[in-house]
Amino acid sequence: MIEDVIARWHRYVESRSPDALDDLLADDVVFYSPVVFTPQRGRAVTTQYLLAAADALAGEADGPFTYTKQVLAGDTAVLEFETSVAGRYVNGVDIVRCDDAGRIVEFRVMLRPLQAIQAVHEQMGRRLTAGA
């Protein structure tokens, strides 16, 4: 099941179509941000975060957003990525867990180094505030 979910995720990343997220995300999905302590719960707020992240990390990034590694096991995938934001190298992982219906129920983002976290936090904050 996770293979299909991740194939659909990659199609979303290429298209960045918000409609694709409707089919991917479970109603009760939980999003764990690298810069927000409290988990964000529900499809609507997770969609906001993922769209802002797509803009910050891929849409207006200094360099191309590229997944460099992928590990799939059971209901979980770990996708490592690289890009640059505001002149800062960004390396991170998306940890994605799905349910039996092929919907994402948990999405966790981890970033490094510290300067990258700060740059992404600033970019995401602007996008989330503008979209609110």
Image: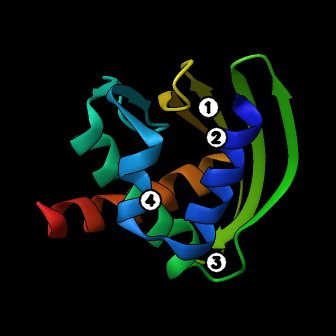
The answer to which image quadrant residue 102 occupies is top right
What amino acid does circle 3 point to? Gly
Q: Residue at x 51, y 25 (%)?
A: 101
Mark 2 → mark 3, Cα distance in angstroms:
32 Å
- For label 3, the crowd category at 10 Å Cα-Cα, with few meaning under 14, some 14 to 19 and many 20 or more, is few
Residue 96 numbered tag = 1
Sequence-wise first label, 2 or 1: 2
**Vertical order, 54 against 3 (above or below):** below
Say which of 60 and 9 sits in front: 9
For disc 2, the neighbor class at 10 Å (few under 14, some 14 to 19, many from 20) is many
Residue under numbered circle 3:
87
**Which residue is at the far left?**
132
| 5 left or right, relative to 21 | right
Q: Secondary structure at mark 3?
A: loop
Left or right, 93 with respect to 131, comes to: right
CA gap between label 2 and label 4 equals 11 Å
Q: Nearer the viewer, mark 4 or mark 1?
A: 4
> Disc 2 residue type?
Val
Q: Do tag 2 and tag 4 residues touch (Cβ < 8 Å)?
A: no
Q: CA distance from mark 4 to mark 1?
A: 16 Å
Labelled disc at residue 5:
2
Height in image: 86 above or below 31? Answer: below
